[in-house]
């Protein structure tokens, strides 16, 4: 806060003309920061603002309902909090009409546009998703947009047995169009890639998502999935993102994401623990054949990495993107895995830790990520101990226990 915001702001204060209006800083979706990151950031920001260190700046912070964030805001200024559900519905609906006409200027005079605004029922995420559905490409003729809008307006939504929301119904329709008329093998393969996009520890490229599933999955298939789901997914700087957090929420909820496609009931839900077990196994399968001593063929052990010419090019050539991801995140996927995959993952650990773990540490150092190694090793050790305690079949003494627990502890103690 001091080094990146307060200090630079005050250094530039002499350049601000007295009549200049305040700058507005928008911090969107604060609730999406993992763990306690959102409340901790807001606490520090509010304390800094309250101390008068950011005069000339105004902050607009948005979040879905979050008790700790709301409590912090009320502590500093109860008048500064605006809750969307308290805004009159007529005002919200009028704003959605303005939004739709701005985003779809070719359709601003069409009666179906007003119908869509009414259907949105005050939900901007619905309206925004509709806009992306109607404009899958930057350049589209009015007739093409009109066809897609009428198709959406004329669709008869099935009666939901789960009482799903409008947004759920829209997501279901988008998935129906992307997955209909696919053979089961193709359906399952595409769904696994979609689940991978949502379960990776960082946003990844279509190529990495495909490689994290199998050697046969292709980048082209992963890219087609993003294209078919353009209303909810997009690619930025080569990586796949989702537009709104409500989409992964929808996919991770079996009740909401179980619906019919072409008359057949399908379950599009992602079992997060089971899929993390799949990704964990795949990380080990990728790392163990590829990791080896002196993976970048460095000419001498007497040189610091910084002294090796073109070290970054060597790292990219010899380690690459998919191995980089596996090295950095196998432990996180392991701890998120389902306990019923214990035996399968145990076999991976038994093979990995006696020797491959040393090559992994070398690779992590080359990736400038060696500081992650202690926490990843401790995390793996905790997972081993947890599954041993919680699984009934693990209660008797396991004669092979030392083969898969002791190496982890010894490497963790080394750090």
Image (spheres, rainbow, N blue to C red):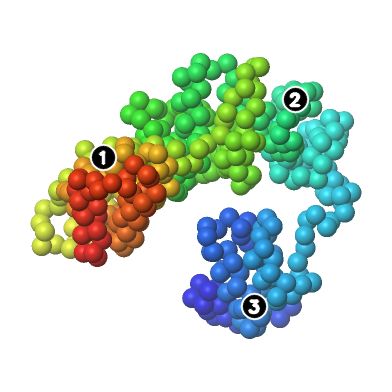
What's the CA distance linking mark 1 and mark 3?
Answer: 53 Å
Residue at 62% in and 33% down = 257
> Which one is closest to the eye, mark 3 or mark 2?
2
Q: Are marks 1 and 2 in contact (CB under 8 Å)?
A: no
Q: Nearer the viewer, residue 148 or 256?
A: 256
Labels 3 and 2: the sequence-earlier one:
3
**In the rendered structure, which disc, 1 or 3, sits on the residue that comes first in sequence?**
3
Whether residue 238 is visible:
no
| Residue 147 coordinates in the image, percent (x, y) | 74, 23
| Residue in view at x 60 percent, y 73 percent | 43
Marking on residue 158: 2
Mark 3 → mark 2, Cα distance in angstroms: 50 Å
Where residue 254 sits in the image (x, y, percent)? 59, 36
Say which element carries label 3: helix
Q: CA distance from mark 1 to mark 2?
A: 46 Å
**Direction from residue 238 to residue 178 in the image, left or right:** right
Q: Is residue 387 above or below residue 164?
A: below
Depth check: 413 or 7 in front?
413
For the residue carrying disc 1, how many other residues have a C-alpha within 10 Å: few (<14), some (14-19), or many (20+)?
Answer: few
Task: Say which residue appears at 37% left-offset and 44% top-offset.
Answer: 392
SS type, badge 1: helix
Q: In terms of secondary structure, where does tag 2 sit? A: loop
Which residue matches tag 3? 49
Which of the labelled discs sits on residue 372, or is there none?
A: none
Q: Residues within 10 Å of mark 3 (few under 14, many from 20)?
A: some
Confirm or deny contact between disc 3 and disc 2 (CB under 8 A): no
Question: Of residues 41 and 138, which is closer to you in this image?
Answer: 41
Q: Which residue is mark 1?
A: 347
The residue positioned farthest toward the front in the image shown:
396
Please identify the quarter of the rendering in which residue 20 is found: bottom right
Vertical placement of residue 299 versus 289, above or below: below
Could you say where residue 364 lies in the image, as x and y percent from the top left?
Answer: 27, 54
């Amino acid at each position: 806060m001091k080094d990146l915001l307060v200090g630079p702001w005050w250094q530039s204060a002499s350049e601000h003309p007295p009549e200049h209006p305040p700058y507005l800083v928008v911090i969107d979706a604060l609730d999406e920061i993992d763990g306690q990151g959102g409340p901790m950031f807001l606490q520090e920001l509010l304390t800094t603002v309250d101390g008068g260190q950011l005069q000339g700046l105004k902050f607009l912070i948005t979040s879905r309902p979050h008790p700790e964030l709301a409590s912090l805001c009320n502590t500093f200024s109860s008048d500064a909090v605006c809750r969307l559900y308290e805004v009159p519905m007529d005002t919200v609906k009028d704003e959605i009409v303005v939004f739709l006409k701005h985003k779809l200027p070719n359709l601003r005079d069409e009666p179906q546009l007003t119908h869509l605004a009414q259907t949105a029922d005050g939900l901007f995420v619905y309206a925004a998703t509709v806009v992306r559905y109607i404009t899958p490409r930057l350049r589209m003729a009015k007739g093409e947009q009109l066809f897609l809008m009428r198709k959406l307006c004329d669709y008869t939504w099935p009666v939901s047995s789960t009482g799903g929301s409008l947004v759920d119904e829209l997501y279901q329709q988008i998935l129906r169009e992307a997955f209909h008329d696919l053979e089961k093998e193709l359906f399952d393969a595409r769904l696994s890639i979609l689940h991978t996009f949502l379960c990776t520890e960082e946003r990844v490229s279509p190529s990495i998502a495909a490689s994290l599933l199998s050697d046969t999955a292709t980048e082209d298939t992963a890219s087609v999935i993003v294209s078919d789901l353009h209303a909810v997914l997009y690619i930025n700087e080569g990586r796949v993102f989702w537009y709104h957090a409500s989409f992964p929420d929808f996919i991770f909820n079996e009740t909401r994401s179980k619906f019919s496609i072409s008359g057949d009931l399908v379950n599009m839900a992602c079992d997060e623990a089971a899929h993390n077990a799949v990704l964990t196994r795949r990380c080990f399968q990728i790392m163990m054949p590829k990791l080896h001593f002196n993976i970048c063929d460095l000419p001498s052990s007497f040189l610091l990495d910084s002294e090796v010419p073109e070290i970054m090019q060597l790292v990219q050539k010899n380690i690459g993107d998919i191995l980089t991801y596996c090295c950095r995140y196998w432990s996180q996927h392991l701890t998120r895995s389902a306990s019923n995959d214990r035996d399968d993952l145990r076999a991976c650990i038994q093979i990995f830790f006696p020797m491959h773990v040393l090559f992994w540490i070398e690779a992590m150092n080359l990736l400038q990520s060696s500081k992650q190694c202690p926490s990843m090793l401790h995390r793996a050790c905790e997972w081993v101990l947890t599954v041993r305690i919680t699984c009934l079949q693990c209660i008797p003494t396991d004669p092979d226990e030392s083969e898969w627990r002791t190496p982890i502890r010894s490497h963790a103690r080394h750090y």
